[in-house]
Amino acid sequence: MGEFIKVEIDLAKFAGEEETANWVQVCPVNIFTIEANQPVVVKENEDECTLCMLCVEAFPTGAVTIHRLYEQ
């Protein structure tokens, strides 16, 4: 888990393999990968998240949640 950022995926929001593969590629800092045909968070990359929100915008509402673990 990241020290500054935690990314959660709701697998129930994903329709299929092709959709998942396209979504994983949206992240510019490789936070996501595919394992067993499902998107997963690469835990060691979580803190690389730039909060660009491309993943949140790319897929259905609630599929990805990004938590800042620090105060602004």
Image (cartoon, rainbow, N blue to C red):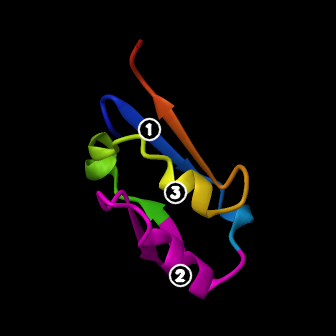
Do the CB atoms of the residues marked 2 and 1 lie less than 8 Å apart? no
Q: CA distance from mark 2 to mark 1?
A: 22 Å
Res. 25 image quadrant:
bottom left
For badge 2, the amino acid type reads: Asn
- The quadrant of the image that shows the C terminus is top left
Q: Would you identify the image quadrant in which residue 2 lies? A: top left
The secondary structure type at the circle numbered 1 is: strand
Decide whether residue 36 is among the magenta residues: yes
Using the numbered discs, state the Cα–Cα distance from disc 3 to disc 1 in whole angstroms.
Answer: 14 Å
Q: In this rendering, is residue 7 above or below 57?
A: above
Question: In the rendered image, which residue does mark 2 sit on?
Answer: 37
Left or right? Give the position of 23 relative to 26. Answer: right
Closer mark to the observer between disc 3 and disc 2: 3
Residue 55, image x, y percentages: 52, 57
- Please tell me how many numbered marks the rendered image carries: 3
**Does the residue at mark 3 contact the one at mark 2 (Cβ under 8 Å)?**
no
Element under disc 3: helix
Identify the residue under disc 3.
Answer: 55
Type of amino acid at the residue the image marks with label 1: Lys
Q: CA distance from mark 3 to mark 2?
A: 18 Å
The image position of residue 28, as x and y in percent, is: 33, 60
**Tag shown at residue 6:** 1
Q: Is residue 8 left or right of residue 6?
A: right
Type of amino acid at the residue the image marks with label 3: Cys
The first of marks 3 and 1 along the sequence is 1
Above/below status of 18 relative to 55: below
* Residue in the image at 34% along x and 42% along y: 50
Q: Range of the magenta residues?
A: 15-39
Location of residue 71 with respect to 47 vertically, above or below: above
**Nearer the observer, disc 3 or disc 1?**
3
Q: Identify which residue is drawn at 44% across, 75% down.
A: 34
